[in-house]
């Protein structure tokens, strides 16, 4: 983790020790374990439970939350707006590049004017006039939708629009998702704050992208850090080495998977998502797990398996 002589960065604005330590995101220190809000859409019929879960995350030291307008067609943003208070000083990270709809639940929205509209939609549903960090979800790497027709858009054109919105004050930092190594190299001059790619102990095809992020001090925010999520994406918790480590250390396989990511690179920030308060606490507790050299070597030796899923 990043070290500092300033003890104030070791705790959140509410005075809670940062789980896993901290790394800089969008120009500020954040806890290395955050929260991915996508699964809150499952609680559409129980807003009280959903907002209580967000409040509990803050109480446990979470101070960055990943969301998108297309999560629950605006519902998740509304829940965050309701639950998170200014005094919490939580960095809310938005995502653009897709809209609700289509057979998979979302459809690509990659054209520059669509990116701008998505930013406006996020501003409205979150009830703010500025988005601190916006991730552009590209259809370039990992499983998922692939661009066709007018959705084949050059990255440079998209970045030009995002930089323009940054200059206008609508957004702050710029991140990228599902980006290739070449794409990241092309984008670095736009001052990229983070990269969100599919990555886990068993899905490490983007190791070179992670290495470049570490060298450039860009936060690496893996999605599906436990694998799974959709059919065809390998599950980390099915790996015998992960299960053996969990049994040896008195942890769950999911906690070992998250702990490995925190140990693997200092710029890793986790946004494991859940709609269950118990799972939330267990995910955050993964930051307390120490993996010795022998265990790390065993886990590092687990082979990478390609993800063959198709999802939105």
Image (cartoon, rainbow, N blue to C red):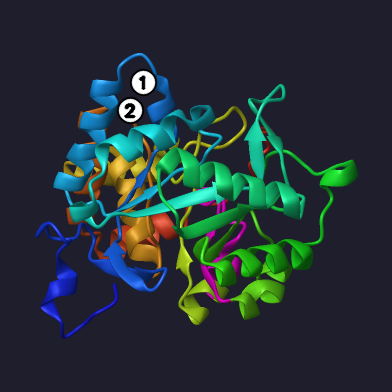
Q: Quadrant of residue 144?
A: top right
Query: Secondary structure under badge 2?
Result: loop
Q: Say whether residue 196 is visible.
A: no
Residue at 65% of width from left, 52% of height from top?
116
Q: Position of residue 301 (x, y in %)?
A: 47, 58
Whether pointer 2 and pointer 1 mark residues with C-beta atoms closer than 8 Å, the reply is yes
Residue at far bottom of view: 5
In this rendering, position of residue 48 left or right of residue 153 = left
Quadrant holding the C terminus: top right
Q: Image height check: is 75 above or below 1?
A: above
In this rendering, position of residue 236 left or right of residue 165 = left
Q: Earlier in the sequence, mark 2 or mark 1?
A: 1
In this rendering, position of residue 201 left or right of residue 89 = right
Residue at 51% of width from left, 44% of height from top?
122
In terms of depth relative to the viewer, which is nearer, 79 or 2? 79
The residue labelled by disc 2 is: 275
Quadrant holding the N terminus: bottom left
Q: In 3D space, how far apart are the residues under numbered discs 2 and 1 (Cα atoms)? A: 7 Å
Q: Say whether residue 99 is visible.
A: yes
Q: Residues within 10 Å of mark 1 (few under 14, many from 20)?
A: some
Q: Position of residue 78 (x, y in %)?
A: 39, 33
The residue labelled by disc 1 is: 43
Q: Position of residue 53 (x, y in %)?
A: 24, 32
In this rendering, position of residue 128 left or right of residue 55 = right
Does the magenta run of residues contain 160? no
Q: Residues within 10 Å of mark 2 (few under 14, many from 20)?
A: some
Residue at far right of view: 149
Does the magenta run of residues contain 193? yes
Residue 284, numbered label? none
Residue at 34% of width from left, 49% of height from top?
258
Q: Which residues are magenta?
A: 191-211
């Amino acid at each position: 983790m990043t070290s500092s002589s300033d003890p104030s960065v070791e705790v959140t604005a509410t005075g809670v020790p940062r789980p896993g330590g901290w790394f800089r995101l969008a120009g500020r220190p954040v806890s290395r374990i955050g929260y991915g809000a996508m699964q809150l859409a499952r609680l559409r019929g129980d807003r009280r439970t959903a907002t209580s879960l967000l409040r509990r995350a803050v109480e446990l030291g979470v101070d960055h939350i990943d969301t998108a307008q297309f999560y629950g067609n605006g519902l998740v943003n509304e829940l965050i707006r309701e639950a998170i208070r200014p005094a919490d000083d939580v960095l809310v990270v938005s995502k653009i590049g897709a809209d609700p709809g289509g057979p998979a639940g979302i459809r690509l929205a990659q054209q520059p004017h669509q990116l701008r509209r998505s930013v406006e939609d996020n501003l409205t549903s979150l009830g703010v006039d500025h988005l601190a960090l916006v991730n552009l979800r590209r259809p370039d790497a990992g499983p998922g939708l692939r661009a066709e027709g007018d959705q084949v858009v050059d990255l440079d054109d998209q970045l030009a629009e995002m930089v323009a919105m940054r200059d206008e004050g609508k957004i702050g930092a710029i991140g990228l998702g599902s980006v290739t190594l070449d794409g990241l190299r092309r984008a670095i001059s736009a001052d990229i704050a983070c990269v969100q790619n599919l990555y886990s102990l068993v899905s490490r095809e983007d190791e070179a992208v992670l290495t470049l992020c570490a060298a450039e001090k860009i936060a690496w925010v893996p999605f599906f850090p436990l694998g799974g999520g959709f059919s065809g994406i390998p599950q980390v918790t099915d790996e015998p080495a992960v299960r053996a480590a969990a049994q040896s250390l008195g942890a769950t396989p999911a906690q070992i998977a998250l702990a490995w990511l925190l140990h693997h690179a200092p710029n890793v920030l986790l946004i494991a998502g859940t709609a269950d308060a118990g799972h939330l606490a267990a995910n955050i507790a993964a930051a307390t797990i120490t993996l010795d050299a022998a265990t790390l070597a065993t886990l590092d030796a687990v082979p990478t398996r390609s993800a063959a899923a198709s999802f939105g």
